Each structure stands twice: as C-alpha cells, then as structure tokens.
Image (cartoon, grey):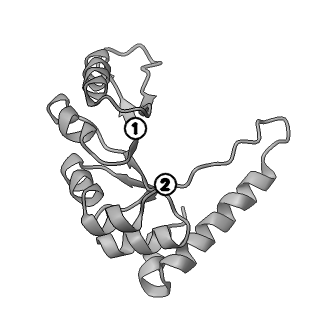
Amino acid sequence: MWRAGSMSAELGVAFALRAVNERVQQAVARRPRDLPAIQPRLVAVSKTKPADMVIEAYSHGQRSFGENYVQELLEKASNPKILSSCPEIKWHFIGHLQKQNVNKLMAVPNLFMLETVDSMKLADKVNSSWQKKASSERLKVMVQINTSGEESK
C-alpha cells in the first residue's frame, strides 16, 4: 500500500495530496461503468500532525480530516487557527468510540462523520447527545454490523 505520509515530509503536503488524488482518480476511471458515479471522499488522517499542516492541506483543497482519539480531535478542531483558516473543514472520528466520550465528541466543531458505531447502546447515546446539541446538520454515522453471528464480535 502506498502511503502519502512518508512523502509529505520530504516533498510537501501539496505534492502528496496531488499524488494521492491522482491515484484515486485513476481508480475511479477503472471502475465498472454500471456502478453509480459517486465521487470518493479522501479523508486525510491528521493524527500527530500539527495544526499548520492541517491548514496547509486545507489551503490545497483538502476538506475532510480524520482523528482517532476524541481528545486530540477536540483540541485540533477547536484550535483558533484552524477554525479561522478552515471554515469548511469536515472532521471524521475514525477511532473506537467509548460511551463515556460521546458528549465530548459531540462538542467537536464541524464534526461531520462518526466511523463507526458498533452497538445499539452507543448508537442510542450518540443519537441522544446529538439531539441535545440541537444542530441543524445531521451527523453521518457508519454502523458496524456483525455478519458472522459470533457473540464475541
């Protein structure tokens, strides 16, 4: 698997984003024509990256960013520089969400998607917390489904 992260430090964020987007478009061009023409969304994982790097990627057209720890996401999404420089940013939570962190996550500015919800209890808590926020936007949520029937999953 090709990783843009290793190249970005050496050649810059703009080059890495352009290279990844070119590969995505090449893959899109190869997909069967009978599939819906839905444009894929590139989510740049910004964990361990400084706010300035997020702002640089945003300035080159990247809008979706992912974090896998609630506290890091809250800190980064609440950063005054990011808030003022990136008005259309869309944050994705890509880690495992624990019930005790739901309210913290719902406080994240520009939270766009939660990847993933793996239990009814968690789904109910997320739903309740999002409704209390009284946002006009809907939170997008990916649901993890146990297709194996194994109790441990």
Q: Marks 1 and 2, Cα distance to the nearest angstrom?
A: 12 Å
Q: Residue at x 40, y 71 (%)?
A: 55
- Taking the image as shown, residue 39 lies to the left or right of residue 152, namely right
Mark 2 neighbour density, 10 Å: few (under 14) some (14–19) many (20 or more)? some
| Helix, strand or loop status at disc 2 | loop
Would residue 112 be seen by someone viewing this image from the given angle? yes
Amino acid found under the numbered disc labelled 1:
Glu
Would residue 49 be seen by someone viewing this image from the given angle? no
Amino acid found under the numbered disc labelled 2:
Val
Q: Nearer the viewer, residue 146 or 49?
A: 49
- Taking the image as shown, residue 80 lies to the left or right of residue 15, namely left
Q: Is residue 67 above or below residue 120?
A: below
Q: Residue 115 shows which numbered tag?
A: 1
Q: Residue 43 shows which numbered tag?
A: 2
Q: Position of residue 48 (x, y in %)?
A: 28, 66
Q: Is residue 36 above or below residue 63?
A: above
| Helix, strand or loop status at disc 1 | strand
Q: Residue 34 shows which numbered tag?
A: none
Q: Position of residue 129 (x, y in %)?
A: 25, 26
